[in-house]
């Protein structure tokens, strides 16, 4: 996990409703407002691996971000590296842009 990273502060920055950090193996590292986080981290890890393989297979490069748009919100996963995957969800779809921008800014740090 990145040093000096406060998930609660990052969640406030994104205006999201919940956030999670896990690694490529699906091990939960931190969470804010996520129920059943261990299961969620494991399932998300598998989805990221599959999406990354697909992304590489169609020759568009490795997976950076995975966005789930649902009827009642959005969930954005950012694959920073094998030890640092961050996910943020919001029940307000209009916050998608702020979440994505915050993820991009985190990458620059």
Image (cartoon, helix red, strand yellow):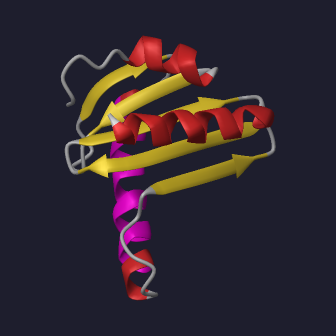
Percent from the top left, x then y, of residue 12? 55, 14
- Whole-percent x, y for residue 80 in the image: 32, 47
Residue 31 visible? The answer is yes
- Does residue 17 appear left or right of residue 32 in this picture? right
Read off the magenta span: 38-54
Query: Nearest the camera: 90 or 10?
Result: 10
On-image quarter of the N terminus: top left
User: Residue at the location (49% across, 23% down)?
Assistant: 34
For residue 2, above or below residue 8: below
Q: Quadrant of residue 36?
A: top left
Using the image as rendered, state which of residue 33 and residue 82 is in the foreground.
82
Expressed as whole percent of the image width and height from the top left, the position of residue 24 reads 24, 50
Q: Residue at x 25, y 50 (%)?
A: 81
105 on left or right of 95: left
Give the prevailing secondary structure in the magenta stretch: helix
- Magenta-span inclusion, residue 32: no
The residue lying toward the viewer, choosing from 1 and 33, is: 1
Residue 45 falls inside the magenta stretch: yes
Above-or-below relation of 15 to 48 = above
- Report whether 32 appears left or right of 2: right
């Amino acid at each position: 996990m990145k040093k000096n990273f406060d998930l609660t502060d990052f969640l406030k920055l994104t205006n999201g409703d919940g956030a999670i950090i896990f690694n490529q193996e699906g091990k939960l590292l931190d969470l804010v407002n996520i129920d059943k986080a261990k299961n969620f981290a494991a399932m998300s890890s598998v989805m990221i691996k599959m999406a990354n393989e697909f992304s590489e297979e169609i020759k568009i490069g490795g997976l950076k971000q995975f966005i789930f748009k649902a009827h009642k919100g959005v969930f954005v996963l950012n694959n920073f590296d094998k030890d640092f995957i961050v996910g943020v969800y919001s029940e307000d779809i209009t916050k998608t842009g702020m979440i994505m921008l915050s993820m991009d800014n985190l990458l620059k740090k």
